[in-house]
Image: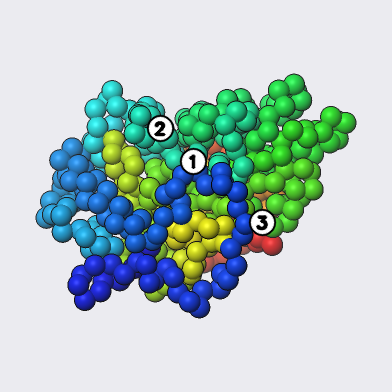
Amino acid sequence: MTRASKAKSGKPKAVKASKTKKAPVTKTMKVRADEYFDKREIRSPAARLKSQIAALQTLIAHAKKASPYYRDILKDVKPAKITSLAALAKLPVTRKSDLAPRQKAMPPLGGLLAGKPSEIANVFQSPGPLYEAYGRPTAKMKDPWRFARAMWAAGCRPGDLVHNTFSYHLTPAGRMTEGSAHAIGCPVFPAGVGNTELQLDAIIQLQPRVYCGTPSFLKILLEKAKESGKPATSLTKGLVGGEALPPSLRAELKSLGAEVLQSYGTAELGLIAYESKAMEGMILDEDVIVEIVRPGTGDPVAPGEVGEVVVTVLANPVYPMIRFATGDLSAILPGISPCGRTNTRIKGWMGRADQTTKVKGMFVTPGQIGQVAARHPEIARARLEVSSENNLDAVVLKIEAKGHVSTVDATALAKAVAESFQSVCKLRGHVEVVATGSLPNDGKVIADLRTYQ
């Protein structure tokens, strides 16, 4: 999709670009008739591009009319002139770092809201803090968050009870996946995070078939269930997200009885891409246009080159996202998936274009570490190190104190900083007071030391 170029007539050559003869995919899987969520997943790339460009023109026209923010940044843009992906690539990029100060200056949503309050279903908060709005489900758009497509690919079917462990507090993941399950026709047990023993009791009693949540928490649940002598054998399918799913963890979950696939999305955008049973890259959602650009710019990179993921959502007119830079790194894969879905694939999450990182499903930013340090004038420098132990995220906030501190003072400081870290970042972490000058002089506030194998 992002590789389409203009022919001499000015029309995108999307079909030829996606049917490259030398693509590595040479064999198509055998699939059942109900394998696909809808027929849009298997339409021709040309038909998809035509539909998306028409939807894009409508979205830009609506955003300019109804949103003060887009009225300003797109004031010289004529929607009818946006007839190709090359034309889209010339529009301004909106970054998450741009939105927080705008929202403070122009509450509640920085002028991005393009709908009536009665059209809003939910307003969420993500780290920053940053706020996002989603429209109410309608007859035309039953699933504004669009995770139903990913859940279907993971094996979720009408009537399946979904055990949803994504958070329902402030952040959007719990509500998003619940709404998508309802769009399929699935009841949901809103488990949220924590309360492991109570959750196991519910699993044994209710026998849910599908799990939604982070893969690390699913591992905790299944291992504790096995240890208790009451295995959670009903949980055979799952859609996981919020953190990495290395092959070793996927294999562990399968050995415990659960086959899971990944989704990739954000609070602002909803679903971006998802895995299918082929597990060869992640397939783009039908209601997004994804570009891979050189980090810090809006310029598309060459096909296959790693760059920053920039997304335009075509299905949330209440809170438009046009060329939203995620800060995530990925790359386009050539060819189409062996599962038969014809949309563009990306390699999946390949890190961050900045030092922002995701820990236990929550983003942590250098600015947040700065906020923690600002609460304690004794701190000279702070550096968050993120590692992985047995496929579980672990964080250590290392701090250098101003001047010499005694062991007693260092212990008290570490305890106080740990409380501030949890308050600001909504995560628990270990705090270590280190010797002055011992932290690396590399400019990093957050060092992600995790490796995925």
Tag nearer the camera, 1 or 2:
2
| Residue 240 left/right relative to 202 | left
Tag nearer the camera, 2 or 3:
2
In the picture, which quadrant includes the N terminus? bottom left
Q: Which mark is residue 291?
A: none
Q: Earlier in the sequence, mark 1 or mark 3?
A: 1
Q: Is residue 317 above or below residue 161?
A: below
| Residue 233 left/right relative to 434 | right
**Element at badge 1?**
loop
How far, Cα to Cα, is label 1 from label 3?
A: 21 Å
| Residue 419 left/right relative to 12 | right
Horizontal and vertical percent for residue 419?
A: 58, 35
Tag 1 near tag 3, CB within 8 Å: no
Horizontal and vertical percent for residue 41?
A: 46, 51
Q: Earlier in the sequence, mark 1 or mark 2?
A: 2
**Element at badge 3?**
loop
Q: Which residue is mark 3?
A: 246
Q: Nearer the viewer, residue 319 or 361?
A: 319
Q: Which residue is mark 1?
A: 147
Q: Residue shown at 22%/46% (left/top)?
A: 58
**Element at badge 2?**
loop
Q: Residue shown at 21%/43% (left/top)?
A: 63
Q: Nearer the viewer, residue 114 or 363?
A: 114
Q: Amino acid at mark 1?
A: Phe
Q: Amino acid at mark 2?
A: Lys
Q: Which residue is mark 2?
A: 142
| Residue 272 left/right relative to 91 | right
Q: Residue furthest right?
A: 229
Horizontal and vertical percent for residue 361?
A: 56, 43
The quadrant holding residue 223 is top right
